[in-house]
Image (cartoon, rainbow, N blue to C red):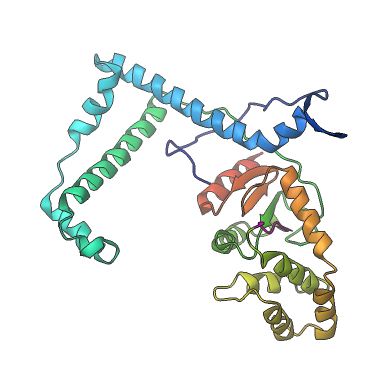
Amino acid sequence: MLRPTFALLALLAVIIPTTVSAEPAASVGSWKLDVADVDKQITHKIYELREAKVQEMVIDHLLELEAKANGIAVNQVMDEMVNKKIPPLTDADVTAFIEANKGQLPEGGKGMDAKIRSYLQNQLEENLQGMYLRSLTNKYQVAFLLKPPRYTVPGPQDLSKGPATAPITIIEFSDFECPYCRRAQETINKVEKKYGDKVRFVFRHYPLPFHKKAPKASEAAQCAKDQGAFWPFHDALFAKGSKLEISEYKKLAKKLKLNSKQFDHCLDSGSYASRVAADSKDGKSLGITGTPTFFINGIKLVGAVPFTDFTEVINQELAK
C-alpha cells in the first residue's frame, strides 16, 4: 500500500462512525442494501482520507509556525529554509547517474543530460524537504492521534502456523497467482524470524477474478492440508518458477510424498471449491479489493508493504 511520505508517528484514537440502526441505501426487488453494509466496505478508505488530510493540515500549521518564527511569508518557508540551501548539481553528478543507469535509459541516456539534471534536482529537493518536515515534527512535538480501524475477520483460521496463544495474529488473504503475494512471502519470513512465537500466521484464500488459475491452486493447497502438508505446498506454489497447472500440483504432491490417489481425487472432485469461495466471500465483506491484504490483530495492511510497516504495527500491539 502506498503511504504519504510524511511519516506517521503515533497512532492512538479516532473511531470511524458506524450506523447504529438500519438505514436503507438501495434495493433491488426484495434485496435490500443498508448504509451500514456500505460503510463496512469503505472503512479503510475513510481512514486513509482522514490520515492524508490530517497530515496535510499539520504540515500547513508547521509551516505557519516556521514563517512566524523566521519573519517570512508561509509560501517562502520551503525556499528559504531548504531549497536555497541545496548545492547545485554538478556535471559529474549527472554523468555518474547516466553511467549507473545506462541499461535502463533510452539509447543509454545519450542527449538526456538536461532531463536527468531536472529529475535529480527534484528528487533532491523532495528528500530534503521531507527531512525538514520530519525535523519540525520533533521541534514542535507533533503527535498524530488517528487510530486505524480494527476489523473482526470472520471465517475459519485452520490454515495457521505459530502458537494459538501468540499475542499477534496475522491473517493474510492471498492469491497464488499474484506476483505481489509472492513478493510478500520474503517479508512474512522476516517477520516470522524476528518475532518467533509471538506471531501466529493465518492464510485465507482470495483468488482474484482475473487470475484464472488461482482458484484451483487454492483447492490443491487445501487438498495438501488434508495430509498435513499445507505449508510446504503453499511455499512451493509461491516459489519462483512454479507452474500453476493441475498436472504440476499432482507432481508436487508426489514430491512431498503425499498419498497421490487421495490427493488426485480431492483435486479432481473440486471438493474444496466451496471453501475457496467462502474465504473470498469473507474477504469481500471486509472490503478487500486486492492481494495480498493482511490483518494484524485486526489492523489492515494492503499490498506487498515493506517490513517496517509490519514491525510498526506489531511493536505497537506488543507494547499494549
Residue lying at the far right in this picture: please name it: 30
Of residues 208 and 200, the one nearer the viewer is: 208
Magenta stretch: includes residue 297 = no
Magenta stretch: includes residue 207 = yes
Q: Position of residue 28 (x, y in %)?
A: 81, 34
Quadrant assignment, res 35: top right
- Quick check: can you spot residue 102? yes
The residue that appears at 80% across and 31% down in the rendered structure is: 27
- Quick check: can you spot residue 33? no
Quadrant assignment, res 218: bottom right
Quadrant assignment, res 33: top right
Position of 94 relative to 235 (above/below): above
The residue that appears at 61% across and 54% down in the rendered structure is: 292
Position of 112 relative to 72 (above/below): below
The residue that appears at 49% across and 36% down in the rendered structure is: 8
Q: Is residue 61 left or right of residue 269?
A: left
The residue that appears at 50% across and 27% down in the rendered structure is: 53
Q: Position of residue 205 (x, y in %)?
A: 72, 59
Position of 69 relative to 197 (above/below): above
Q: Is residue 270 left or right of residue 172?
A: right
Q: Position of residue 184 (x, y in %)?
A: 56, 59
Point out the stretch of residues depicted in magenta: 203-209
Q: Position of residue 290 (x, y in %)?
A: 61, 51
Of residues 198 and 175, the one nearer the viewer is: 175
